[in-house]
Image (cartoon, rainbow, N blue to C red):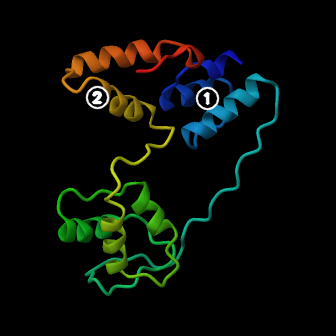
């Protein structure tokens, strides 16, 4: 299908979905699948919505012994405490979002700290598919360590303007 041969920004997908009278929310992958199904004359079955945690969320003050309730979100309160403990390099990456998403009410903030430190080794981690620009940027910088930003952006535009199946290595 021609539609799937091209790279689309999420905003472009949402606008296209609205033009076709389709739901324009969800992840980039969901939008792509919804539009592709519509263009192909197929029914799109919406994925089951994950229930939002309705339970207690941490509100502070936090300590290493604070128990993380089931369904705790990656909140600003949690971010502030972890940044205080780890430093400004802390961020909710996939490993940390997964840790909190799987919280079952038995882990503590110390466990979260330990998880952060345990997941920092091992070099660069995979970047999820929906972050194609980030994956491209990492690969481009590996291939062009002294490259300038304007060169990166020109290479990205060239890469993005080609169909997916005609893209070569970066």
Q: Earlier in the sequence, mark 2 or mark 1?
A: 1
Q: Nearer the viewer, mark 2 or mark 1?
A: 2
Do tag 2 and tag 1 residues touch (Cβ < 8 Å)?
Answer: no
Rendering coords of residue 121 (x, y %): 32, 58
Q: Which residue is mark 2?
A: 141
Identified at 48% across, 43% down, the residue is 128
- On the picture, is 153 further left or further right than 32? left
Rendering coords of residue 26 (x, y %): 58, 43
Q: Which residue is mark 1?
A: 18
Rendering coords of residue 94 (x, y %): 43, 55
Rendering coords of residue 54 (x, y %): 54, 73
In the image, which disc is placed on residue 105? none
Q: CA distance from mark 2 to mark 1?
A: 36 Å
Identified at 44% across, 45% down, the residue is 126
Whether residue 84 is situated above or below residue 34 in the rendered picture: below
User: Which residue is nearer to you in this view: 143 or 76?
Assistant: 143
- On the picture, is 118 further left or further right than 61? right
| Callout 2: SS | helix
Identified at 65% across, 37% down, the residue is 23
Crowding around mark 1 (Cα neighbors within 10 Å: few <14, some 14 to 19, many 20+) is some
| Callout 1: SS | helix
- On the picture, is 161 further left or further right than 110? right
Identified at 61% across, 29% down, the residue is 18
Image mark count: 2
């Amino acid at each position: 299908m021609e539609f799937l041969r091209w790279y689309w920004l999420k905003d472009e997908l949402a606008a296209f979905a609205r033009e076709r009278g389709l739901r324009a929310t969800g992840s980039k992958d969901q939008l792509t699948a919804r539009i592709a199904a519509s263009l192909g004359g197929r029914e799109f079955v919406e994925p089951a919505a994950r229930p939002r945690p309705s339970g207690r969320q941490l509100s502070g003050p936090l300590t290493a012994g604070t128990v993380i309730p089931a369904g705790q979100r990656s909140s600003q309160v949690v971010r502030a405490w972890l940044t205080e403990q780890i430093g400004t390099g802390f961020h909710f990456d996939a490993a940390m979002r997964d840790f909190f998403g799987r919280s079952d009410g038995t882990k503590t903030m110390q466990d979260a700290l330990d998880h952060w430190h345990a997941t920092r080794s091992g070099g660069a981690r995979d970047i999820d598919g929906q972050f194609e620009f980030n994956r491209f940027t990492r690969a481009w910088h590996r291939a062009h360590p002294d490259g300038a930003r304007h060169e990166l952006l020109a290479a990205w535009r060239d890469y993005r303007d080609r169909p997916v199946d005609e893209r070569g290595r970066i």
